[in-house]
Image (cartoon, grey):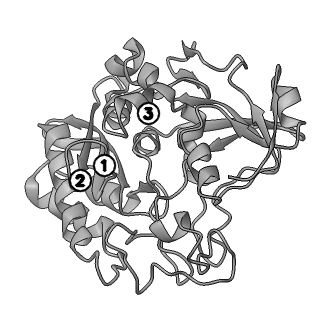
Amino acid sequence: MQSFSFTKAQTVEEATGAGGRFIGGGTTLVDLMKLNVETPSTLVDITGLPMAEVEKLPDGGLKIGAMVRNSDLAFHPEVKARYAVLSEALLSGASAQLRNMATTGGNLLQRTRCPYFRDTSYSNCNKRNPGSGCAAIGGHNRMMAILGTSDSCIATHPSDMCVGMMALDATIHVSGPKGARSIAIGDFYHLPGTTPNVENALEPGELITHVTLPAPRRQSRQVYLKLRDRASYEFALASAAVVAETSGGHIRNIRVAMGGVGTRPWRAHEAEAALMGKPATPAHFRAAAEAALKDARPQSENGFKVELAKRCIVRALTMATA
């Protein structure tokens, strides 16, 4: 770890004007600093900012402060009762100790677990060293992405929480030197393309202040299903977040998101289109899963993820429409 200066912000304006990297729970940033993957010259402590509340909004939605801890969010009564997919996603991630420290804002900005990104002895990582190549292509890539990849990067987005928020149509609110703005979660994450080092829509100095979720549809059911190598403290091989509303045995409204398979939290629009208005049957679930994975580009070691992700979607849809 390299030396750095440290300051504690008292206000959002002070934080965004400090010109450093923001640190809250530190469960990602500190790890990467120890590995010399991240080498900020200044850390700005934002733990004292008033962003640790969960509030019900007048329109029935929910406001989640960026400093709300993952454990607090997962067990919040409003989240458990009305946004079950988010609670389930949070509780399937990391360990209890990490969830007690990790924050909503930090989880939204969680970086990949690609071993070549985290090991600086490998110089060829376009995400860490733009233009150097991608060691995972042709290397150890069992955990890597099969959707949204490019010839420059196949790193998987690791978050569970973000998959749940993707299915809930979350909006991310930020503040920075140019003022405040709101970004739909579907527009927040960038595909790697030729610039995998540019991961999201944040501009220099911008700080995530809170997230808002729209009011859930009254008759909807929500499910998060995570498939992994072991039962706890493990990243997804494939996961599915489903928010479904049925009537008369037919699907009236559906949202499907996937984790463990994409370079960003993956919204399966093709699956949704294949399901809208259709009977909630295994055949239609399988057809939706096929549509969701039709553009998959597996690598040398992760071809199994294609079928695994399809089965994950089918099972999650079955659970959500039972």
Q: As drawn, is 56 to the left or to the right of 44?
A: left
The amino acid on which the numbered mark 3 sits, given as a three-letter code, is Leu
Which mark is drawn over residue 98?
3
Q: Give, as a three-letter code, the residue at label 1.
A: Glu
Who is closer to the viewer here, 296 or 22?
22
Instruction: Report crowding for label 2: few under 14, some 14 to 19, many 20 or more residues within 10 A (C-alpha).
Output: some
Q: Which residue is mark 2?
A: 228
Query: Which one is closest to the eye, mark 2 or mark 1?
Result: 1
Up the image or down, 65 lies above or below 256; here it is: above
Give the mark toward the camera: 3 or 2.
Answer: 3
**Of residues 43 and 1, which is closer to you in this image?**
1
Tell me how many marks there are.
3
Query: Which amino acid type is shown beneath numbered disc 2?
Result: Arg
Query: Who's the residue at 37% across and 79% down the image?
Result: 297
Q: For marks 2 and 1, give the CA distance.
A: 7 Å
Q: CA distance from mark 3 to mark 1?
A: 12 Å
The residue lying toward the viewer, choosing from 302 and 225, is 302
> Which residue appears at 57% of the width and 22% of the height?
63
Q: Which mark is residue 234?
A: 1
Quarter where residue 176 is shown: top right
| Res. 284 visible in picture | yes
Q: Earlier in the sequence, mark 2 or mark 1?
A: 2
Return the x and y of residue 264 as percentages of the image width and height. Answer: 49, 58
